[in-house]
Amino acid sequence: MNQSSPGVNLVIYRILIYGALLFWAFLCLFPIYWTITTSFKTAVSVTQGHLIPWIDFTPKWIGFRSLGLSPETIFQISTVREEFLKRFFNSVITSVSASILAVMLGSLAAYGLSRFQYKLGFVKNSDISFFFLSQMILPPVVLALPFLVLYRELALLDSTIGLVMLYALMVLPIVIWIMRDQFSTIPIELEEAGLVDGLNVWGVFMRIVLPISFPGMVAAFILCLVLSWNEYFFAALLTSADAKTLPVMVASQTGSQGINWWSMAALSTAAIAPLAIIGVFLESYIVKGLSTGAVK
Amino acid sequence: MTTTYIGTDHVPAQQKTLGRVIIFIATILLVALFLIQILYKTDTITLGFENWRPTLYAYLLWSIALCWGILLIKGDRGQRALFVLPAFLFTIAMVIFPLIFSVYISLHDWNLSAFEGQKFNGLDNFRALLVDEYYWNSMLNMVYYLVAILFEYAIAFGLALLLNSQIVARKFFRVVFLMPLMLSPVAVSWMLGKSLMEYRFGPAATLARHLGWESPAFFSSPEIARFSIMVLDAWTFIPFMMIMLLAGLQALPKEVNEAAKIDGATGWQHFWKITFPLMLPVSITATVIRIIFKLKLADVVINVTSGGPGGATDTVTSFIFREYRDRSNVGYGTMMAVVYLIIIIILMTLMLKLIDRWMQKVT
């Protein structure tokens, strides 16, 4: 034991903790700050490494102008903006529909598996659960090329529906994982009371279980949304002109060299903004979804 | 958890027959359409559809008929089966069928840009794969990337402990720490890989110069490039492990901490003797899920280095991606993917078995 008083120790301890916290917060936020400010920088500011707006450099709407989204170009006709908005709404439609589909299918399956005993030959509940959850270890690359060939035959290549089905498949195990956990926390007596009142199992599910487990479903939905909004691999392989999503557009722009960093920065900012906003306002749901399985 | 529900399992015979008829008709329809399409595609008959889309609709119709039929035949039990059936049919169509098809593709010399179409070549693809240096190189890279999880885990645990201590503005820090996970890996590739770590003007490179690294090229030498990719991936996914570990920490019983304080254990001892062992189950869950995600790593590699320099950063997924994009070689690409899947399944099964046995010994 050293001689210093516990008070001094405590202060040092506090400083260390807050120092570490602030340091990591800086690591998390600086890239985002850098991207947003770079979209307002001219080439000179970029090459000289200017960091702070209004002190180091004068912010200009240069990045968003190149996307047709700056104040003076927003009311003009812009092909870049049209392209961007098309990709943006493709992403919205694809990720939202895939998440809805996955949450619907997954919640039903999870409820069935957590409440009833199924038996089909030697297949039991635990086997069915394993069948669904084991999909999680399936790397996308295994399905990618067969789907390329299959979708070509099915005329689903470069279609939003094809992408929606794949994304739903990809996030389905996660929904089942989360919802099974959610349903097991609902006291079964509630459902028994519903059955006594004359509802059938589907009535019980719709009227009693669904409202109670709604927050869990929102958590699962948001997690699905994050994963399918950010998905790049399938989209890059299976879409070309019509159904192309935002990540594919961002990636194709990164390839082109040159120093129009401002437009890349503006594009990146626009691509991460929706989820960043969701992250700030619906953080508790994401935490809830991710915490599944951490606590038994 | 099970309950016995009050309800009749008795179903009128007439209804049962109706259910069977519905399923029967739908099955005939599906099989007939499938056969017609095969015959049409092999030029045996002239009547058929231009593509396989109608077969997909037929499967959809068959699925609905199957659900309805089971409902009619089994009554109350059918109602319960209906919860799992849609997800089951969906997964069968989207995974099992394509997997079988992928084995079929992998046994062919199949190049999408070639005119002559596919040709059966048995295990030729597999033989080519065995001597493909680049493939095994990417496999070795996966091992390096997996080892990096240990460091991610250590950092995530540290952050979880920080968030779990007595601090103000905990919610703020949690939101901030979670942020990288929300960003798309493609955007991260540009934000960090292509601009922050850019050789000439990137702030990270400038900082490295100030710290005394003469030429801070993050992606030119193999080892450093691999390390940079690890950092990018870790930056995105550390929050994921952090949140799981934090949930575990918050669920620890309070008495444990208080008992330790009375015993006069120091923070360090307390951590190793009490917190860490109690957190083992959560740690294992988090690590296993992280491994699963790591095995899919590709987006960052494709967009920042394209596997370079000299394949030093290639993952199996990014390698197969380029094999398809540059050469349209579907047959060989699929064979590589199938082999990857088999290796993953074997290793994961072994790992889970070992963990199971080990956990039984510990607890």
Image (cartoon, helix red, strand yellow):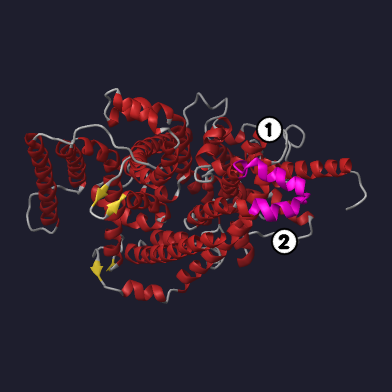
What's the amino acid at mark 1?
Pro
Pinpoint residue B257: horizontal percent, then vertical percent. 69, 44
**Residue A59 numbered tag:** 1
Pinpoint residue B201: horizontal percent, then vertical percent. 69, 50
Q: Residues within 10 Å of mark 2 (few under 14, many from 20)?
A: few
Q: Residues within 10 Å of mark 1 (few under 14, many from 20)?
A: some
The answer to whether marks 2 and 1 mark residues whose Cβ atoms lie closer than 8 Å is no
Residue A242 shows in this picture: no
Q: Magenta part mainly helix, strand or loop?
A: helix
What's the amino acid at mark 2?
Ser
Q: Is residue B258 magenta?
A: yes
Q: Which residue is mark 2?
A: B215
Q: Residue at x 56, y 66 (%)?
A: B312
Range covered by the magenta-colored residues: B249-276
**Residue A90 numbered tag:** none
Quarter containing the N terminus of chain B: top left
Apparent side of residue A141 relative to residue B54 in the rendered image (left or right): right
Apparent side of residue A81 relative to residue A276 in the rendered image (left or right): left
Q: Is residue A39 magenta?
A: no
Picture quadrant where residue A164 is located = top left
The residue nearer to you, when weighing A263 against A248, is A248
Q: CA distance from mark 2 to mark 1?
A: 30 Å
Quarter containing the C terminus of chain B: bottom right
Chain to which the residue tagged by mark 2 belongs? B
